[in-house]
Amino acid sequence: MKSLFAAIILFCFTSSSLFSQTHSNFYQSIVDGVKYDSILKSLQKIESLGVKSPGTAALVNAKTWLVNKYSNYGYSNIQIDSFNYNGDMLYNVIVNKTGTLYPNTYVIVCGHYDSKSGWGGGSPGANDNGSGVSIILEIARLLKNVNTEYSIKFINFTAEETGYTGSSNYINAAVLPQTMDIRLVFNIDEVGGVAGEVNNIIKCESDQTSPSTNNAASADFTDTLMTLTGLYSTLGTTNTNAYGSDYMPFQDADYVITGYFENNQSPVVHSSNDDLSNLDTSYVFDIAKAATGATLYFAKAYTNNTIIEGEDSNLMINVFPNPVEKQIFINSSIALSKIEVYNTEGKITFESSLNNQFRSKIDFSTFSNGIYHYKLSDNSGKVLKTGTLVKSGN
Ligand SMILES: [Zn+2]
């Protein structure tokens, strides 16, 4: 009750941003493509590579394996950010997907692929952070051919375990020099849970540290992440503060962050026991679904053939009056380029350019009485609205 009441109040008095966080069938159809087998195979591979700390062949092999995976998914814009760290070459793997509307504004989906050296010979890193890496691979696979308004960078950072070395290097080498426009950093680190326990809650992490100028936006996105997690998975959520992972250097540079972290915290991470037998693969699978739904939403995904009204809070189109006797009026928040009118058999009976206008008027007086369907599209051919009109008065 409490939360419903709050939602109604917000909807009435502020923006429509909450309204757009409704379940999307289109997003669900992509989320349904998350494969348990893909996740499992990635986890097995990451574990089998061994301890991936700076200076190891395993870390280099992991980089090569990642690049091959992304290129097998069809990505060609894969960038390797290499740098020297204590005499060893280290590599961040950055996969670029260009947005259609905001090509220079990025949603970064990231998770480190190195693992901890040290205790008991070091960690194979199945949970920390094979879990995050396997999820990011799966999101990248599923989104390859999906249009997004914002650009996405899928990033696997190296050397998180030595103190965010990879992400810090990337910020200094690329983000700050380019004054990169980043909509959101969505970090996924250690989301394997604990084998034998009930793992059904995920921590959604918001920025609660200095500088505070970016904290409110982080809280908003994290709120949204919690809602989306509920829409696209069966997981419960809890809001916690972000700390101890690659989003921290971004927040230090005043960027907006959010993240996932396991609620049941593994007692074996950073040790040689961080293997598949000690995590919950079904939990990783569920988080992959939630993370896919969230990425689709954050990057504003759409298809050319899909009606985006209802998925884009900035889009409003009114067609009236209905029933219509003489003419219809079309008011739109986005310039429209074309109307097509169909009869009930799906045959096109009328087609007209709308000249990229926000307001149009169409004469219906010569149409015979009956039911008509219409389609409104923009100048890229994207259908923004369909509907039904009743013609009367003849
Ligand atoms: Zn980690």
Image: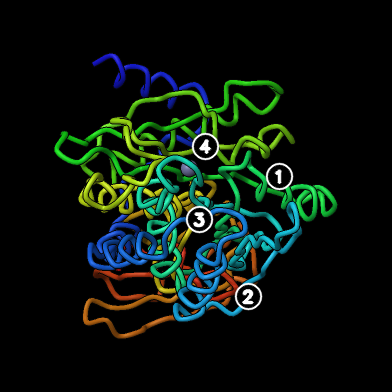
What is the quadrant of residue 12 in the picture? top left
Mark number, residue 168 = 1
**Left or right of residue 70: residue 8:** left
Q: Nearer the viewer, residue 284 or 77?
A: 284
| Residue pointed to by mark 3 | 113
Q: Mark 4 or mark 3, which has the lower sequence index?
A: 3
**Left or right of residue 59: residue 383:** left
Residue lying at 55% horizontally and 38% vertically, measured from the top left? 245
Could you tell me which secondary element the residue under label 3 belongs to? loop
Q: How far is the residue under mark 1 from the one under mark 3?
A: 15 Å
| Residue pointed to by mark 4 | 258
Q: Nearer the viewer, mark 4 or mark 3?
A: 3
Residue type of the residue flagged with mark 4: Thr
Is there CB contact under 8 Å for labels 4 and 3?
no
Residue type of the residue flagged with mark 2: Asn
Where residue 117 appears, as percent x and y from the top left, is 51, 47
Q: How far is the residue under mark 3 from the one under mark 2?
A: 19 Å
Work out whether residue 306 can be spotted: yes
What is the quadrant of residue 96 in the picture? bottom right
Where residue 125 appears, as percent x and y from the top left, is 40, 50
